Image (cartoon, grey):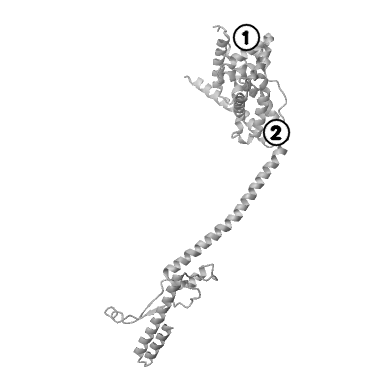
Amino acid sequence: MNEEYLWDKTGGDAEIEGFEKVLQTFRYKADEPPTLPAKTFSLAEKPRRNWFQLGFVVAFASVAVLTVPTIWFLATNRDLSIRTEMVRTHDPVLTVAGQNDVPEKIAIRPASGPESKRTSSSRTIKPAIKPLKTVAVNSKSKDQPVKLTKEEKYAYGQLMLALSITESKLKIVRDTIAGDDESKSALQRDKDLFQK
Amino acid sequence: MPDHEMTGDLFLFVRTEATAASPARAEAGLVERISAGDEEAFGELYRRYAPMVHGIVLARVPRDEVDDIVQDVFIAAYKSLTTLRDNNAVGGWLAMIARNRATEYFRRAKPADELSEDLGKNDPSRAEANEVLAAIRSMPDSYRETLVLRLVEGMTSREIAEQTGLSPDSVRVNLHRGMKLLRQNLGIEVKR
């Protein structure tokens, strides 16, 4: 067998040529290429694909329109609740709306005793947290009053009472030091206020 | 190995690479034109590769079905042209589609489909052709495909390699062993 003829058809080989002649009947007969499918099915399928794409876009837009404000709303509410909780934890007085008259400095006079002798003069302590001013600026719900629970209202009342008593006692002490004889009458007035 | 032989091998290698690159570039251009909607380019692709696809399908399925499957292969290729990763390998890609379509045919085919193969036995030359083709089809895939492309479609080993994506050495080996096996199947004595 002529290998060159088998590979490149160079030269000749009777056996291979015989096979070629016999099998020639099955050889591909040139015909026209098939009609391109775009002509036949594009009109039928294209609109369906467009409708599908359009539907997908509409559905996606709807989900986005519903989701984004919801997430924004939840995020802002969560932020507000975290801030409120933080303020409540540190100082319940500051959570009350309208309490803008919280003093920035509180003067404390030490009681008489062995330790107090070391600090004979009064000292000034700054509040631990910058109060409601800061909270009101950062918080977006400035107009919304903070709702207190029953326990918080009770605690708030007790605190106010304690403050008023403390204020009265401080006044008595101040008057005593100053030698004011009306201190007794002031004490009596405070007691009357307490009983009311 | 002497120096001049080494040089000759290297020269041959370089030449082979250089000549193989130009049809690949032409293939890539053809695919780009078809993707752009050029129907004439599709016709050119069909005329260039139809014999190869025909041979691959003929090596596997009954003759009556071959022409329809060839058309199906090209339509399928046109529809999924965007999935072709390498535009230079369109021949191997078409060959793969043709093999898959042939396999798919047998998955769907009914036993009655084989009837038409026996009708040509009344004609002696046709009967001989059927016998040789049956002997080729009984071989392993790689041998029968290469032999059909060579003996039926009349392609050279180089054309077979370029169009199917096989290496030229593989084609030569397949042709050599396939011819040997064909003779055995037909009971032809080998003359030395």
Q: How many marks are shown on the rendered structure?
A: 2
What's the distance in space between the residues labelled 1 and 2, CA to CA? 45 Å
Mark 1 / mark 2, whichever is N-terminal: 1
Quarter of the image where one finds residue A92: bottom left
Q: Residues within 10 Å of mark 2 (few under 14, many from 20)?
A: few
Where residue A14 appears, x then y in whole percent?
62, 9
Which residue is farthest bottom? A181
The C terminus of chain A, quarter of image: bottom left
Q: Which mark is residue A77?
A: none
Q: Residues within 10 Å of mark 1 (few under 14, many from 20)?
A: few
Quarter of the image where one finds residue A184: bottom left
Where residue B189 appears, x then y in whole percent?
56, 6
Residue under mark 1: which chain is it in?
A
Quick check: marks 1 and 2 in contact, CB under 8 Å? no
Q: Dot 1 lies on which element?
A: helix
Of B145 and A67, nearer the camera is: A67
Q: Amino acid at mark 2?
A: Pro
Q: Amino acid at mark 1?
A: Ala
Residue A5 in view (yes/no): no
Residue found at x 67% / y 36%: B35
Residue A79 in view (yes/no): yes
Residue at which label 1 appears: A14
Residue found at x 29% / y 82%: A112
Q: Dot 2 lies on which element?
A: helix
Where residue B34 appears, x then y in whole percent?
68, 34
Q: Is residue B158 above or below residue A1?
A: below
Q: Same chain for marks 1 and 2?
A: yes
Along the horizontal axis of the image, is B21 left or right of A194? Answer: right
Which residue is farthest front? A195
Q: Is residue A89 above or below residue A33?
A: below
Of B56 and A45, nearer the camera is: A45
Residue at which label 2 appears: A37
